[in-house]
Image (spheres, rainbow, N blue to C red):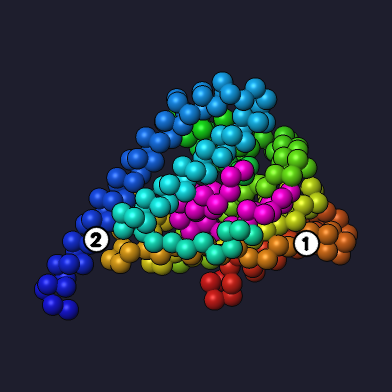
Amino acid sequence: MSLWRQGVRQLDKCWRVFATGLCFSIFGAGALGLTFVAIPLIGLQSKQEREREKAVQHAIQRAFNWFCQMMRFSGAIDYKIVGAETLRSDRACLIVANHPSLIDYVLIGSCLPHCDCLVKAAIWHNPFMKGVVKAAGYIPNTDPESLLENCSHRLNDGNVLLVFPEGTRTTPGVEPTLQRGAAQIAVRTGMDVRVVHITVSPDFLTKQKKWYQVPDTKPFFLVEVKDKIDINGFIANSDSLSAAARQLNQHLADVIFPAKEH
């Protein structure tokens, strides 16, 4: 490779470090703007709690969509979402996805005007995010006793619930495993499961790397909406709900992580 091409590639990489930092800085400022400006205004207009939560979720979707487009426009990343219309048409089901990067929820959420989400405890202590997730009515993954009841209530209302069954971001080079929480929620509420598969090439925003450790080439995110899994078959062919959850969890692992990735 000529010195000129090496220089161009290095300049491109430096720009993507700057663009990524700028985008995440704006993301943090936007979260504070939602917390202290947009959400109070929504509260003045919407008197019912669930109505306010849906309005906040819609605001989050628009903010996520704007953020994704900003990341693309700046050259930090490129992405493609296949089946967004199918995802938007889903009602009363779980959306289950793999979790290779920091922005997986942002990419999926950018398609969904109304989406409940199972949120880990750390997010509820994040000063940029805790006000937003609380106002959106997201479900904290902290109390096992109330978790299933909260999920069932939202799903029975016709909502979709986004869950990352790995529990944390995938570690590149390490065989991924799924926690059984998503499968338990599905079989115990009797709700179907929509699978979403995300690939990132090359790896970017993984758990092991900082945001500024950008790859040599621009990362490309592919979000693919897969088939919906009928939960009734697993329940009917099992002796118990626990057994159905185990079978469903194994099936989810096979679907979310194709054989070439296992």
Residue picked out by circle 2: 13
177 up-or-down from 151: above or below: below
Q: Residues within 10 Å of mark 2 (few under 14, many from 20)?
A: many
Residue visible at 54% across and 76% down?
A: 260
Real-space CA distance between mark 2 and mark 1, rounded to the nearest whole angstrom? 44 Å
Residue picked out by circle 1: 230
State left or right for residue 41 relative to residue 13: right
- Three-letter code for the amino acid on which mark 2 is drawn: Lys
State left or right for residue 33 relative to residue 153: left
Q: Is residue 142 visible?
A: no
Query: Magenta region: which residues?
Result: 87-114
Q: Nearer the viewer, residue 136 or 129?
A: 136
User: In what element is the residue under mark 1?
Assistant: loop
Q: Is residue 142 magenta?
A: no
Q: Residues within 10 Å of mark 1 (few under 14, many from 20)?
A: some
**x and y percentages locating residue 177 in the rendered image:** 59, 60
Q: Residue furthest bottom?
A: 1
State left or right for residue 234 relative to residue 35: right
Which mark is on residue 216?
A: none
Residue visible at 86% across and 64% down?
A: 237
**Quarter holding the N terminus?**
bottom left
Q: Nearer the viewer, residue 43 or 7?
A: 43
**x and y percentages locating residue 126 in the rendered image:** 46, 34
Residue visible at 59% across and 34% down?
A: 55
Residue visible at 68% across and 66% down?
A: 227
Q: Earlier in the sequence, mark 2 or mark 1?
A: 2
- Three-letter code for the amino acid on which mark 1 is drawn: Asp
Q: Quadrant of residue 128?
A: top left
Q: Are marks 2 and 1 in contact (CB under 8 Å)?
A: no
